[in-house]
């Protein structure tokens, strides 16, 4: 563990500290340029050891960092590492850390050192599935069974627990080796076959039970992932939760009046019929939505293929023009270098200048042609997408109107039953006993009509809301794919023109740098 030195001020990582660290680890030939701005994205390793650091901060700019040393400081909390998603090697040993945390985004981490801290529990490391080397010696780990947590790291080959209280347990070595069968090194020693065999023999029953539980958990996880993947697909088709009674159940969620009226004679059968018909309409919409999603995806795929084919043809033309030019240019440059007189060399240089200008015009003309071609493709794509979205929206409206019609018919029939029951109640002709809360609804016609109209209005709002969600998602998708197509083409055109200009400038500069000796007077 690191001890705080009262004579030295605790530090928080800042730009000044990291810049100094980068300069210190630069090769000697780069130190001359240390005053220039450092591009943190180019830094892959950073050493911040022995700097009395109390808090981790200001590392978000090092997005390509693969190795980070923060050992021998006074750090109390693992934080500020979220953006270091490429980190492979992390050393936080010899600090004052009490809890393992803040590592969730470090999916590529292979080597982690937390030795000589104050950690008492193995936790919060579930995402580190590539972990191969883990050192957590000389901490406060006391419970040997906690080592089982490390079984989730299937690539773990090297583990150091030396110096923790749990190491004093007489079962320690065999328990760890049995529960972590992939280990090659434990506490800096090779796990030999004799130890491995003894561990397996002693803890076979426990490990077999663990393997069974892990297999069941894995199967459950895969099932949940498959369900989530399926749900994401349904969301992409804008028809999530329409493959069943989800919407119908939502209509009656938090509707106490509906539950009360179920006691009335005939309402149960009426509700069951309504449910079956409503769910059938929802499933029709669900299936239609999936079919249309496939068609939309096919439309986008066809557009991308057409785009790719046009660009490939254009690039081939570009390459042919450039290869022809470079062949001529090489020949002409040789002629300039080998010219027998100054005038001949200058004449050849003038020809080269003209050839470069013609090359520039040819490349720019090709770019204009492909731009026009792609513009037409995008316009056709936009029209096709608009037509497909429009057709889908109109059909969705038609199907959702069926839901509203079912709700309206159900409401009318429910009103009839309720009013008939009210009239019988007034005449004391009811054959069945009704609960008191149901009788409260049947006090008079105004009360029952108001209650039913309120529930009916809420259900219609929910149906309208679901329809609106589908339409809005469709509009957003339509705008997104067309805007992306236009933006990608603008970016491509801009980048292509930039490359042409740079290429031409390079050729012209190369030509101008040729020295032609003037004839002696």
Image: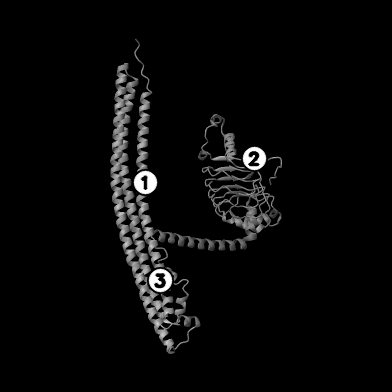
The quadrant in which the C terminus is found is top left
Q: Residue at x 28, y 43 (%)?
A: 372
| Crowding near the residue tagged with mark 1, few <14, some 14–19, many ≥20 C-alpha atoms within 10 Å | few
Disc 3 vs disc 2: which is toward the camera? 3
Nearest the viewer among 76 and 14 is 14
Q: Looking at the picture, how far across and down is residue 250, in whole percent?
A: 44, 69
Say how the picture is coloured. one colour
Question: Along the polypeptide, which appears first: circle 3 or circle 2?
Answer: 2
Residue contact at pointers 1 and 3, CB within 8 angstroms: no
* 35 is higher (above) or lower (below) than 315: above
Residue contact at pointers 3 and 2, CB within 8 angstroms: no
Q: Report helix, strand or loop for mark 1.
A: helix
List the residue tagged with mark 2. 51
Mark 1 to mark 3 CA distance (whole Å):
44 Å
Mark 3 to mark 2 CA distance (whole Å):
67 Å
List the residue tagged with mark 3. 457
| Crowding near the residue tagged with mark 2, few <14, some 14–19, many ≥20 C-alpha atoms within 10 Å | some
- Where residue 316 is drawn, which disc sits there? none
Q: Report helix, strand or loop for mark 3.
A: helix
Q: Residue at x 37, y 36 (%)?
A: 498
Question: Along the polypeptide, which appears first: circle 1 or circle 2?
Answer: 2
- Where residue 487 is drawn, which disc sits there? 1
Nearest the viewer among 75 and 459 is 459
Q: Looking at the picture, how far across and down is residue 256, in whole percent?
A: 48, 75
| Crowding near the residue tagged with mark 3, few <14, some 14–19, many ≥20 C-alpha atoms within 10 Å | some
Mark 1 to mark 2 CA distance (whole Å):
47 Å
Q: Looking at the picture, how far across and down is residue 428, in whole percent?
A: 44, 89
Residue 441 in view (yes/no): yes
């Amino acid at each position: 563990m690191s001890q705080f030195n009262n004579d030295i001020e605790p530090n928080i990582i800042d730009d000044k500290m990291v810049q100094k660290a980068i300069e210190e680890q630069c090769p000697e030939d780069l130190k001359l340029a240390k005053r220039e701005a450092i591009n943190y994205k180019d830094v892959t390793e950073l050493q911040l050891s022995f700097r009395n650091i109390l808090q981790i901060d200001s590392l978000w700019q090092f997005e390509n960092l693969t190795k980070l040393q923060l050992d021998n400081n006074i750090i109390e909390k693992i934080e500020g590492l979220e953006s270091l998603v490429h980190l492979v090697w992390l050393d936080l040993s010899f600090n004052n850390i009490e809890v393992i945390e803040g590592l969730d985004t470090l999916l590529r981490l292979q080597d982690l050192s937390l030795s000589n801290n104050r950690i008492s529990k193995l936790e919060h490391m579930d995402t580190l599935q590539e972990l191969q080397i883990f050192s957590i010696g000389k901490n406060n780990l006391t419970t040997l069974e906690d080592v089982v947590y490390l079984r989730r790291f299937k690539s773990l080959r090297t583990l150091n627990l030396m110096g923790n209280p749990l190491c004093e347990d007489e079962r320690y070595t065999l328990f760890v080796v049995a529960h972590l069968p992939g280990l090659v090194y434990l506490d800096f020693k090779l796990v030999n076959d004799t130890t491995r065999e003894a561990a397996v023999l002693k803890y076979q029953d426990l490990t077999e039970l663990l393997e069974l539980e892990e297999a069941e958990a894995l199967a459950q996880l895969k099932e949940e992932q498959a369900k989530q993947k399926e749900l994401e697909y349904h969301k992409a088709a804008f028809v999530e939760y329409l493959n069943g009674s989800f919407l119908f159940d939502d209509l009656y969620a938090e509707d106490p009046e509906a539950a009360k009226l179920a006691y009335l004679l005939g309402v149960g059968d009426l509700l069951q019929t309504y449910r079956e018909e409503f769910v059938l309409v929802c499933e029709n919409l669900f299936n239609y939505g999936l079919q249309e999603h496939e068609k939309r995806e096919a439309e986008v795929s066809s557009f991308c293929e057409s785009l790719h084919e046009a660009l490939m043809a254009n690039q081939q033309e570009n390459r042919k023009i450039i290869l022809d030019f470079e062949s001529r240019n090489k020949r002409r440059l040789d002629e300039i270098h080998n010219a027998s007189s100054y005038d001949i060399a200058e004449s050849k240089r003038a020809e080269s200048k003209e050839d470069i200008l013609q090359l520039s015009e040819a490349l720019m003309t090709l770019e204009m042609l492909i731009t026009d071609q792609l513009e037409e493709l995008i316009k056709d794509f936009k029209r096709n997408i608009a037509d497909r979205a429009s057709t889908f929206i109109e059909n969705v409206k038609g199907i959702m109107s069926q839901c509203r019609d079912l709700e309206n018919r159900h409401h009318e029939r429910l009103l009839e039953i309720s009013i008939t029951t009210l009239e019988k109640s007034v005449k004391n002709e009811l054959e069945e006993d009704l609960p008191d809360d149901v009788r409260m609804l049947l006090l008079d016609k105004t009360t029952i009509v108001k209650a039913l109209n309120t529930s009916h209005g809420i259900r219609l709002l929910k149906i309208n809301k679901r329809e609106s969600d589908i339409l809005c998602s469709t509009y957003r998708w339509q705008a997104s794919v067309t805007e992306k197509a236009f933006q990608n083409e603008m970016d491509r055109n801009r980048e292509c023109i930039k490359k042409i200009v740079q290429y031409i400038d390079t050729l012209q500069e190369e030509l101008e740098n040729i020295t032609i000796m003037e004839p002696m007077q």
